[in-house]
Amino acid sequence: MTTLKQPCPSFSSPCIFAAGEMDAVPIKMLGMPLVVRISERFTLLRNASLTLLFFAFSLGALAQGTDAAQYAAGEKLFKGNCASCHKPDKDLTGPAMAGARARWEGKGDIYAWVKNSSAYLKTGNPYANELFAKWNKSVMTAQALNNEEIDAVLYYADNYVPPAGPKPPIDPNPKPEASSNWPWLVVIGLLLAVVAVSLSGVKSSLTNAVREAEGQEPLPDMTTGQKLRQWAWNNKGFATIIALFVVTFITLKLWDAAWVIGVYGGDEVEHYKPEQPINFPHSLHAGKVEAGNLAIDCQYCHSSAAKSKHAGIPTTNVCMNCHTAVSEGRSPEGTAEIQKIYAAAGWDPAALKYTGKIEPVKWVKVHNLPDHAYFNHSQHVNVGQLECQECHGPIDEKMDVAEQWAPLTMGWCIDCHNTKDVKMAGNGYYDEIMARLEETDMGHSELKKYLEDDKISVRELGGWECAKCHY
């Protein structure tokens, strides 16, 4: 067999062409098994493939800037013009926007439909009329968008990526959980009681042994109560001190308990936070936008706070104003809580309609006052112009579930009335009070007394009168 040494057409090293053969074999492969030769060729093929993939990825990365700009433009237009009725990836009042261009392909003019659906329906287009009938004959608002802007909206919908929810902030200095010493005190007290009983028995046995040795009769057996009475009689001074201490302690405890009758939290139960049937995160709904929250005004849900005594518990209809569109939370747990709202309201998220089967939410009351104490939300919101956080704490920042922040005891209320400055400027209620005070000499003298410290407190305007809260 004759061979010819010449450059290899597809390898960097010289090849040997065997006579009568068309395949070239690199010189460095001569004498290698067939498997090794295949492996060598596979390695070269792999490297070439990876090079092509890297090149394609680079081209995609170069083109990504234009796509990102179109996506951002489409997102802005979608939120400004379409989001009230459509979602990119799910049906709402109208169909999901994703895939709309493909669905309209060959069936009509999607641009004309978006710009003025009412006018386009008059053309008799079958697909347009089919959509109109399918979606309960809801007329789509005409949109002042040009073709390029519509393209951007459709591009955004087709490439929609759900935003990731913000991660909860991590406290750099977490406070250790408060631990109670009461269990240990109880255990120690029981041990001391056992020791005292044991020592008392030992003492009785020793006393009887001594009396027996002296030829005397043993002491009669006595009950624990009898022994205590005998000890108290024999130690009158010490027993009197102990009795006074016990009576004083019990009296003080009863006095403190009387201040929080009917109050769930108070000073005894810090931050009372009962478990609720639906975990409504106040910090998410009322929290600041800068923290990634929704900044919903408190009175949107508690609309009666400015109109009546009670702030009111919002009905599920208020929740559904938003949650007909918002069906997913920022976590699987949040989505599960939204499903509880749907069950309570009787809403079918798949069919997007009410079923009529409702389940009232059994909320657990958090803030409570005794029946003999009068409190009016509207007075404090409208006249006092207080922010909700002054009584309810940082409910927009820290509370995943509502809790009682302030003790709401009588002492707490009258202290606030004593120290809180009245906001006189621009307040019609206090403008009237000022006008009445200026009408008489007595009013002048009262006003002069009020303004000695350059401020007017609620107490100075009658906030400490018993009948104001206990009428």
Image (tube, helix red, strand yellow):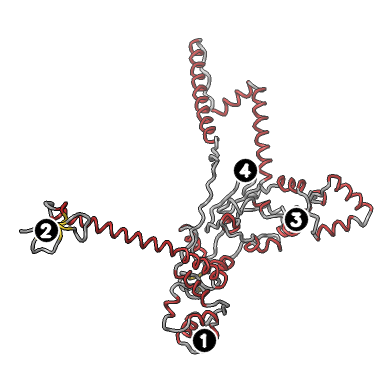
Mark toward the start of the polypeptide (3 vs 4)? 4
Amino acid type indicated by mark 1: Leu
Distance between mark 2 and mark 3 Cα atoms: 105 Å
Mark earlier in primary sequence (2, 3)? 2
Label 3 – label 4 distance at C-alpha: 28 Å
Tag 2 or tag 1, which sits nearer the N-term? 2
Q: Is residue 442 left or right of residue 78?
A: right
Report, in whole angstroms, how far the alpha carbon at label 1 lies from the one at label 3.
56 Å
* Residue under label 2: 4
Who is closer to the viewer here, 223 or 313? 313
Between the C-alphas of marks 1 and 2, the distance is 79 Å
Q: Amino acid at mark 2?
A: Leu
Residue 322 vs residue 288, the one in the foreground? 288
- Mark nearest the camera among 1 and 2 is 2
**What crowding class fits label 4: few (fewer than 14 Cα within 10 Å), some (14-19), or many (20 or more)?**
few
Q: Tag 3 or tag 1, which sits nearer the N-term?
A: 1
Q: x, y (%) of residue 134?
A: 47, 81
Q: Which residue is mark 3?
A: 384
* In the rendered image, the vertical position of residue 391 relative to residue 157, given as above or below: above
- Amino acid type of the residue tagged 4 in the rendering: Glu
Q: Are marks 2 and 4 in contact (CB under 8 Å)?
A: no
Give the number of the disc on residue 268.
Answer: 4
- In the rendered image, residue 81, in percent from the top left (x then y), is placed at 56, 73
Of badges 3 and 4, the one in the foreground is 3
Give the crowd class for mark 1: few <14, some 14-19, many >=20 residues within 10 Å.
Answer: some
Is residue 345 visible to the viewer in this orientation of the structure? no
